[in-house]
Amino acid sequence: MHLVVRRYRPSDKDAVLTLFSDGILEHINPSFYNAISNPVNVGVTLFLSVAGYMLGGGSTLWALLLAGSWVGLVYYCCSQLYASYVRERLRTDMQDIPGCYLSHPDNCFWVAETEVNGRVEILGMVAVVGRRDGEMCGELFRMIVSSKCRRTGLGYRMTQTVIDFCKERGFSKVVLETSSIQTSAVALYKKLGFSHILSHTKTYSPEWMTIISRVTILKMEKVI
Ligand SMILES: CC(C)(COP(=O)(O)OP(=O)(O)OC[C@H]1O[C@@H](n2cnc3c(N)ncnc32)[C@H](O)[C@@H]1OP(=O)(O)O)[C@@H](O)C(=O)NCCC(=O)NCCS
């Protein structure tokens, strides 16, 4: 498949927004499986089913009701974590990509396109914002590769595009944040020489939701 990586154009907006939402919301189910199989959450589920059974005077229905409510809450926290992120981004920078990413020489937004049966299709995206954070660094955002063409080297190429841009601008490092659930992304960044420098639980959801969903945000950086 011949893919061209180029700067974003306003006509890409619909395809980019769909790719972005799909690429983030796909983490809801993996994060739920990860959270619900966590020993603490397994313990809480078991505890609530026993408590429900006893409080309900030996009722299996009460056991299922209490345990089921907890499992539902865990799913809700996982879905909110990613859904609130998408909502916030669609309301802010993704609403005005030219204004946020293409109006300053230290920022950029790229898409990867290909032609399928004479029709142009957007299969990847990535953005960078230059920041003066003591020293000048580039922050990588919005890295998504369509599920149609994963593991073909596009993510590597898009990340390298950001690294090359940052080098050209004289930045000293590239930084980014991802979540502990995004294991493909973590593997990709590690392959390109990024190291994990810190973890935190600040997201667009209340912190208790992040804790229940057992997700941590990983900050990574690569000195260039
Ligand atoms: C993360 C993502 C961008 C990777 O894109 P990709 O085009 O599939 O990645 P590449 O084919 O360039 O892979 C490069 C390297 O990354 C690592 N990698 C990528 N996907 C991987 C996976 N599923 N499992 C293990 N390693 C993986 C491998 O080291 C791979 O090299 P290899 O294929 O020679 O082993 C893509 O999976 C994606 O869009 N995921 C959903 C959105 C997301 O999580 N974005 C990150 C936001 S921070």
Image (tube, rainbow, N blue to C red):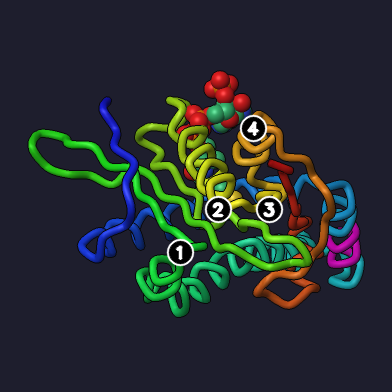
Q: Is residue 46 visible?
A: yes
| Closer to viewer: mark 3 or mark 2 | 2
Q: Is mark 4 within 8 Å of ligand 1?
A: no
| Closer to viewer: mark 2 or mark 4 | 2
- Callout 2: SS: loop
| Closer to viewer: mark 3 or mark 1 | 1
Amino acid on which the number 3 mark rests in the picture: Val
Please name the residue that numbered disc 2 is placed on. Answer: 169
Please name the residue that numbered disc 1 is placed on. Answer: 105
Amino acid on which the number 1 mark rests in the picture: Pro
Which quadrant holds the C terminus?
Answer: top right
Real-space Cα distance between discs 3 and 4? 12 Å
Q: Which residues are magenta?
A: 47-53
Q: Is residue 63 above or below residue 194?
A: below
Verify CB contact (< 8 Å) between mark 3 and mark 2.
no
Quarter-of-image position of residue 134: bottom right
- Callout 4: SS: loop
Please name the residue that numbered disc 3 is placed on. Answer: 175
Say how many tags the image has.
4
Please name the residue that numbered disc 4 is placed on. Answer: 192
Query: Residue 87 or 9: which is nearer the viewer?
Result: 9
Residue 184 shown left or right of residue 133 in the figure: left
Quarter-of-image position of residue 80: bottom right
**Majority secondary structure of magenta residues:** helix
- Callout 3: SS: strand
Real-space Cα distance between discs 3 and 1? 18 Å
